[in-house]
Amino acid sequence: MPINLRSDTQTMPTEEMLEAMRHAPLGDDVFGEDPTVNRLELLSAQKLGKEAAMFVSSGTMGNLCALMSHTKPGEEVILEADAHIYYYEVGGFARIAGLSPRLVPGINGIMSIENIKAALRSKNIHYPPTGLLCIENSHNRGGGSVYSLHQMNEICQLAHGLNLKVHVDGARIFNASVALDVDVKELVKEADSIMFCLSKGLSTPVGSVLVGDVSFINRARKARKMLGGGMRQAGVIAAAGVVALEKMIDRLKEDHQNAHYIGKELSETAGLDVNLESVQTNMVYCNIGQLKVSLENFVQELNKEGIQVLPVEPDKIRIVTSRHISKEDAIETVKVIKKVAANYL
Ligand code: TLP
């Protein structure tokens, strides 16, 4: 079996999840009648300390529903320049929500208050109105880096002072909360909405959740329906989400330890470059630009040795740990990457 470090999205459901899915009471969720979806939504809202929640099929859909519900077409959305919403969601913010992006440079994906302030628009006839500010925590392309509680609060307070709502792309918000050792409720206390994924490190096969206040979630339900995301007996997948929230959060620290081990070892390897500062959760981005090999060939060589990583153009590999990666797998990963890299110095 290859060691699959391409993404935590590749995790398989646990036996307990499969059991829960098999026995879940079901109903028509478009009518609000699926007891298992309702249970997951209630549990999600409680866990994140918000009024309401909505189950969606993916993180991409959750983010898009949030953008559509917070803003009007023609407005501008403030995003970090490497944000997943900007980079990897097929431009849905522009095409479907009708928003233009106001990109803020970040350090390891983390925007400073000063840079956000600099991106704010004055009342000039030429400018689009600012409709929303988004924070990604943990930050994927930033290397799995996290916004601290202080940074989250400071940014939200700045936005609210300007009557601006804040949406958190919290695909991996539980990774952030575990890494910071801050209760997730506390971490997102000042934010207006949060999307989090169940299908990443938490191991469910499908699903994400959007949380916020009641009127926001009511608008988001309309957006979800419009996007074709109204699911029927969705409790069959939501059941795994309940297990994820009850059982799978604390163990994320093991993934962080393994990622840290891999990142540290690779950072000390000739020809490889890892920014250890960004290795705060379950990801390692490793630059192979100094090696005399193309990204494609390097990834192929690793594949042949049973190590699967994700190529990130132009010259990085991404390594993501999850519950399927043991300490032994992490040791083997380092061994193989070091060996292959040494061939191309
Ligand atoms: N990220 C995926 C890919 O799309 C890159 C991955 O393998 O990491 N926000 C963030 C921060 C994400 O990392 C992702 C998925 C999403 C949103 C979207 O979630 P899905 O894949 O459920 O639409």
Image (spheres, grey):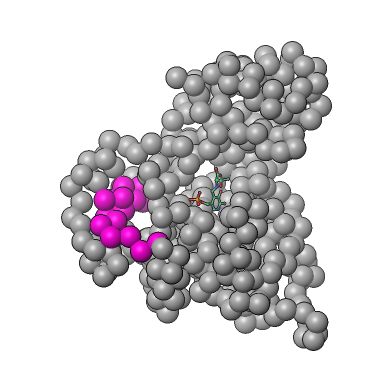
| Above or below: residue 6 compared with residue 193 | above
Q: Residue at x 26, y 70 (%)?
A: 31
How many numbered discs? 0
Q: Residue at x 55, y 59 (%)?
A: 169
| Above or below: residue 203 compared with residue 104 | above
178 falls in the magenta region? no
Magenta region, main secondary structure: helix
Q: Position of residue 243 (x, y in %)?
A: 31, 47
Q: Is residue 310 visible?
A: yes
- Image quadrant in which you'd find residue 14: top left
**Image side of residue 153 versus residue 237, left or right:** right
Q: Residue at x 77, y 79 (%)?
A: 127
240 falls in the magenta region? yes
Q: Quadrant of the C terminus?
A: top right
Depth check: give the residue in front, 271 or 295: 295
| Above or below: residue 253 compared with residue 167 | above
| Above or below: residue 246 compared with residue 68 | above
**Which residues are the magenta region?**
229-246
Q: Quadrant of the N terminus?
A: top left
Q: Position of residue 73 (x, y in %)?
A: 61, 76
- Image quadrant in which you'd find residue 30: bottom left
**Image side of residue 9 versus residue 240, left or right:** right
Depth check: give the residue in front, 332 or 289: 289
Q: Position of residue 271 (x, y in %)?
A: 78, 23
**Image side of residue 195 versus residue 141, left or right:** left
Depth check: give the residue in front, 316 or 332: 316
Q: Position of residue 17 (x, y in %)?
A: 29, 42
Q: Is residue 43 visible?
A: no
- Image quadrant in which you'd find residue 336: top right
